[in-house]
Image (spheres, rainbow, N blue to C red):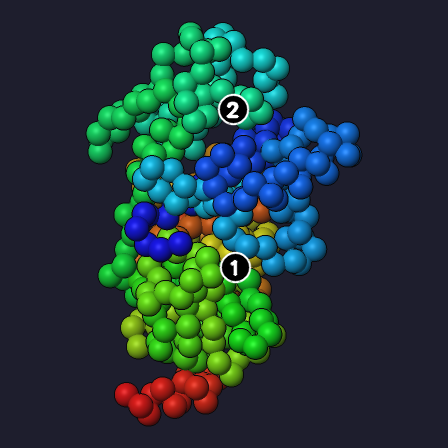
Amino acid sequence: MGKEKIHINIVVIGHVDSGKSTTTGHLIYKCGGIDKRTIEKFEKEAQEMGKGSFKYAWVLDKLKAERERGITIDIALWKFETAKYYVTIIDAPGHRDFIKNMITGTSQSRFEEIKKEVSSYIKKIGYNPAAVAFVPISGWHGDNMLEHSEKMNWFKGWNVDRKEGKAEGRCLIEALDAILPPSRPTEKPLRLPLQDVYKIGGIGTVPVGRVETGVLKPGMLVVFAPANITTEVKSVEMHHEALQEAVPGDNVGFNVKNVSVKELRRGYVAGDSKNNPPKGAQDFLAQVIVLNHPGQISNGYTPVLDCHTAHIACKFAEIKEKCDRRTGKTTEENPKSIKSGDAAIVNLVPSKPMCVESFQEFPPLGRFAVRDMRQTVAVGVIKSVIPKDASTGKVTKAAEKAQKKK
């Protein structure tokens, strides 16, 4: 898979049993990476298990089961192609009470009801419903997925209105083609949060993650923060093809020398050692909005922060001020506590080494969710970071050699 088309990643969300896997499996089946033989095998298995009606979901469940058992799967299976894009699917697990389960059949009134409910929901989290396409589909029968269905003659098509221009269409695949890829900051210094690290026989250590900013190339000397390990990148691959450079949005694996799998972990961030390399954070200042916390949050509160791929407990060391959510103006200095609905400026201290950045410089590494009691209690953006002293750290032989060459 080359670079002829732009790659986009899409996440499929919805509550349990809303048909995410069936719809996604159907799209992959019709436009994508699964060959006919595999599909026929899955269909036969589904039939034997008495689950014939689940054949598309079965496709995804088989892939997931294999992934969970640690079997490497050809990433192409999670892809499909539209007229404009290569699409990689990220199938998110369902959530019981995310959006009420109302879908029993597709009628115009049901569709309008769902559209209204989802519009008000997404508006609350900052999306403009006018810029979002709503398409009634049957993930199982395929209605309105690749072409307009006669069974839904009441549906005259979707249209979106956004500052980049208008778009319209009749079916889901056209709505996917109308997605506008986010602008990709290639000119910024490299930041690549690690999602996983693999040991691959005959190759060695292969960290995997998505380039958020900058460019990753073979031969580059990278630093992994917060561990401050410097080494050379031997090769970069995406979907089993060698790349001469990976740009923001690319999900890549890259081979590094003289670094063991044990030295790297999910949540570490790779950067260019010669261009504003990432560092571990001693502490950081953030603007936090409390969404739903049953009580009061005061100094010393230590929930888990999810920032890029890192998942680390951080202490609310000092709640410096309460502020107005809209204007950012201070409403109270050094408050004793904050509660649901409040916005505050807080000094946070990670309990373990962690690499984060200010939102202004590196947005993907500067926003976070605060998780506690199995829910998101707050969200925040990082205003500034006090880095840890990065003078000590491991420089591999490969890195030393590469430095001498230059």
The type of residue carrying mark 1 is: Gln
At 37% from the left edge and 65% from the top edge, which residue is drawn? 243
Q: Which residue is mark 2?
A: 142
x%, y% of residue 65? 68, 48
At 56% from the left edge and 66% from the top edge, which residue is drawn? 197
Quarter that holds the C terminus: bottom left
Comparing 110 with 55, the one in front is 55
x%, y% of residue 240? 47, 61
Dot placed on the residue nearer the N-terminal end, 1 or 2:
2
Q: Is residue 354 above or below residue 94?
A: below
Q: Quadrant of residue 191?
A: bottom left
Comparing 47 with 390, the one in front is 47
Q: Which residue is mark 1?
A: 195
x%, y% of residue 14? 56, 31
Instruction: Say the numbered circle drawn on residue 63.
Output: none
Q: Quadrant of residue 360?
A: bottom left
Quarter that holds the N terminus: bottom left
Q: Residue furthest right?
A: 49
The type of residue carrying mark 2 is: Gly
Callout 1 secondary element? strand
Left or right: where 246 falls relative to 136: left
Residue 387 visible at all: no
